[in-house]
Image: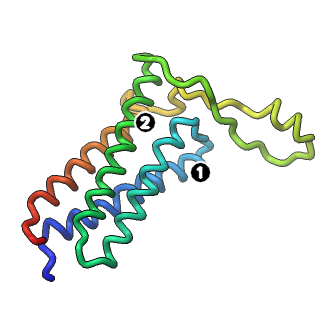
Amino acid sequence: MTETPSMQLAQRLALALPAALLAGAYISQYGFGLYPCEMCWWQRWPHFAALAFALLSFFVPNRKLLLALAAGGILTSGAIGFFHAGVEYGLWEGITSCAAAPLPDDGQSALDAIMNAPLVRCDEAPWTLFGVSLAGFNFLLSTVGGLTIFRLLAKDKAV
């Protein structure tokens, strides 16, 4: 079966976008110390699923369903990012649980490590660019990317 250019572009985008967003999340976490809160983790899981669907699409003859599932995962992460950004900007209330950032092992007891672990709050943006938080950028990029993949799949006439 000959792949149309729109199907090829959809496949590449479905693979590249979640990979790039997850790479950015891990670089910001391990490279710059921006540890994820609970809602940050919620945004990562659909990207992992989208990445898996996009990878699988390279090995099956009918790719459309897998790419649509990948696009759905990307859009799901974007929707969670929208909710998280709204919490960060104080537009609505979020969840009450927070995640603790890991501490270096400096010989303290487990209880001391737990009690002294810094909390990563879901309602505070640890970093912004032009007033847009990481959750806001995830919303923007994931929404545009997911909708673009669906548009490319709709253009593809091969079955």
Number of marks in picture: 2
- In this rendering, which labeled residue sits more in front, label 2 or label 1? 2
For the point 10% across and 65% down, the residue is: 156
Q: Say what secondary structure mark 2 lies in.
A: helix
In the rendered structure, the answer to whether residue 102 lies left or right of residue 30 reads right
What number is the disc on residue 151?
none
Q: Position of residue 67 (x, y in %)?
A: 27, 62
Q: Position of residue 110 (x, y in %)?
A: 88, 41
Q: Say what secondary structure mark 1 lies in.
A: helix
Quadrant location of residue 6? bottom left
In the rendered structure, the answer to whether residue 146 lies left or right of residue 115 reads left
Q: Is residue 9 above or below residue 103?
A: below
What number is the disc on residue 31?
1
For the point 31% across and 39% down, the residue is: 140
Q: Nearer the viewer, residue 70 or 132?
A: 70
In the rendered structure, the answer to whether residue 135 lies left or right of residue 3 reads right
The answer to whether marks 2 and 1 mark residues whose Cβ atoms lie closer than 8 Å is: no
Q: Is residue 87 above or below residue 111?
A: above
Q: Amino acid at mark 1?
A: Gly
Q: Amino acid at mark 2?
A: Ala
Q: Position of residue 65 (x, y in %)?
A: 26, 63
Residue at the extreme bottom: 1
Q: Residue at label 2? A: 135
In the rendered structure, the answer to whether residue 143 lies left or right of residue 82 reads left
Q: Is residue 61 above or below residue 129?
A: below
For the point 58% across and 36% down, the residue is: 37
- The answer for how far apart the CA atoms under marks 2 and 1 are is 18 Å
Quadrant in which the C terminus appears:
bottom left
Quadrant in which the N terminus appears:
bottom left
Q: Give the mark nearest the N terminus, 2 or 1.
A: 1
Q: Position of residue 75 (x, y in %)?
A: 32, 45
